[in-house]
Amino acid sequence: MAWGKKKGGRKEPLFGLPAALADLRLTAADRIPGGEDKPKKSAKSSSKRKSEDAGDEPPRERKAQASRSGAKRRAKSRGGFGLGRLVYWGAVLSLWGVIAVIGVVIYIGAHLPPIQSLEIPKRPPTIQIVGIDGSVLAQRGEMAGANVALKDLPPYLPKAFIAIEDRRFYSHYGIDPVGILRALVTNVLHRGVSQGGSTLTQQLAKNLFLTQERTMQRKLQEVELAIWLERKHSKDEILELYLNRVYFGSGAYGVEAAAQRYFGKSAKNVTIAEAAMLAGLVKSPSRLAPNRNPEGAEARAQIVLAAMADAKFITEAQAKASTGHASYNVKPVGAGTVNYVADWIGEVLDDLVGQIDDSIKVETTIDPKLQSVAEAAIIDELAAKSVKFNVSQGALVAMTPDGAVRAMVGGRNYSESQYNRAVTAKRQPGSSFKPFVYLTALEQGLTPDTMRQDAPIEVKGWRPENYTHEYFGSVTLTQALAMSLNTVAIRLGLEVGPKNVVRTAHRLGISSKLEPNASIALGTSEVSVVELVGAYAPFANGGLAVTPHVVTRIKTLGGKLLYMRQPEERNQVIDARYVGMMNAMMRETLISGTAKKAEIPGWPAAGKTGTSQDYRDAWFIGYTANLVTGVWLGNDDNSPTKKATGGGLPVEVWTRFMKTAHEGVPVAALPSTPGGWGLSNLAQAASQVSPPTPAGPPANAGYRPPPPTRANVRPEAAAGLDGWLMDRLFGGNR
């Protein structure tokens, strides 16, 4: 055996990659499990590898150590993975939460009012309506008092609101998390919404920019706007805005309007008790308003006083002394009949001043004293006799002879019905339309002494009758008008022509459409109370046309003049002679005719009653040289009354009103005919009738009607006026 030669044969040296891989050995742990498709190893090579591995370490001991090491690695890996996973998902959820909040803020912001409108809006304009004496009659729009500076208010007034509504007002930034949490806990305990968490800033944001709906979107908008307000305005500015904008019930917005409404004084002068009551109203202004619920308002005020004492804004002694000492001076709102006037004014404002952007004061011709008298006259008369006569409604208009409305009642109860029966409603005037027929006849040459036949008449199958179903034969026009004889009015209307009667009525001021037929003489075309009263005014003023009006001036609350009524050209629509004749004739209505109950001691007065078909409407229009007043009574559904006539209820209402209206007023005579109406007219009138009637007293005094005598025999067609009428109507020889 050679020196140094090893047993097992000769080994050739290896170089390069083979040399590097010569000592590489794979263990079982290094092999890929499940290698079924790998070539199977021979038992010899397997034995050989085992024997080689055996020289390093015992197999059992090495396996146990490897198992412990793997378990440690797996435990460490699981622990590290759990904490990391928690951090990871926490970060993801936080990111998505931030994105969601940003999205909600963007969405809510996108649905806010446009940015250019996010300024403190102007107050809605109010319309203050004042009477001829300067007193406030009514107000339209929100009742908003003038803005009051915070420094001008007594210090306990704003503190009352802070104490009960937002104790941490000066420390939060628009929203109060503590207040929200407190409200949430309270509401959960009470199982309902018993307490709110809104700050004063949030309430202001809602009042200025948002609706009152209870939704999550509106609440989030309120929060955003509250934060915006806190950044834009100081705390004192926000508190001042709040006090001047918050709603206090009964149409009052702001502390000034509320103090005027409930206590009859400025907010600058309210007491601690009154301040507490105002602060208490904010929670539920409609339910706690003193004019609706004085007990509830007082109980709430005591809670506010306790909160003020608890916050050290007042002492316990002041709180105790202020309990039950609010001096109520509640003014009734919205029930008086003057609101019919206010509505009428509202309808004409656009024509007078156009669109209203600023609050205005409307100065009117209404006399508050006369308005109260007119209201009482209508209401009391209906209260006493509405059931007996089946009359449910009434209206009254009183104006000066130049058309200035002094009083207007559009119904018996404005709170129940706002329908204005003095302006809007149109009803048949009945015989109160007859003066236009008689005036037309006078203008065609007849006189108050002209004779006409009161007898049955038929016009194309229509047979109108007098109210009493009696006929008096030949009567003067004065007697016929005073006694309201229908047959004479129809004959006269046909004689002068229905179209001419319509023209006369329109000339004097009737604006409604009138049908020029035979029945127009009996007032079958509908008119309103205000236009009929206006059409009577020329009889009281000497024949001048008038336009019924109620507005004299309109100014802003700052004093800027927007409108002033200019003196109008007053055309002569009735000749002075005929005005005197008509006044003499209609005076007789009050002396011996259908309005004998109408009386104003010492005052010459005239007028005409009217009753429509089936007693559906009862009218009286009467006047002096001082005032022209018309009264209507009836039912809104046009149902018949129980024989209510113009000479009954309307005359009673008119007399009650006019007696009071003329107290202390110097007596003035009605216009009369200068020098009478002449012998030539009397001769002309006498030649038209047969037989002549005996001479009577002077025409200006009017004739008394003769004792009723029946004239049941129909006049022959060829005799007198009837023959002339038959010829004209049915084509007889003429």
Image (cartoon, rainbow, N blue to C red):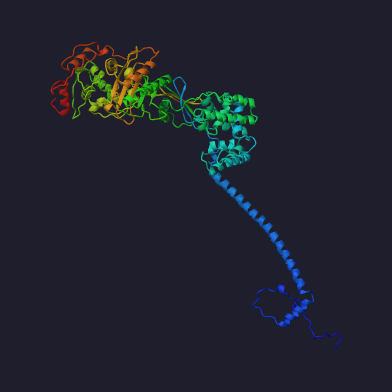
| Residue 64 image position (x, y, % from top left) | 75, 69
Classify 6 as above or below 734.
Answer: below
Q: Nearer the viewer, residue 180 or 462?
A: 180
Q: Nearer the viewer, residue 656 or 426?
A: 656
Q: In this view, does 210 lie to the left or right of 17?
A: left
As drawn, which residue projects farthest toward the bottom? 1
As drawn, which residue projects farthest toward the right? 3
Q: Nearer the viewer, residue 245 or 57?
A: 57
Quadrant for the N terminus, please: bottom right
| Residue 567 image position (x, y, % from top left) | 40, 21
Classify 551 as above or below 242.
Answer: above
Q: Which of 230 and 395 is in front in this view?
A: 395
Quadrant in the picture for residue 689: top left
| Residue 597 image position (x, y, % from top left) | 31, 17
Q: Residue at x 65, y 29 (%)?
A: 312
Q: In this view, does 661 lie to the left or right of 53?
A: left
Q: Which residue is drawn at 54% across and 42% down?
A: 218
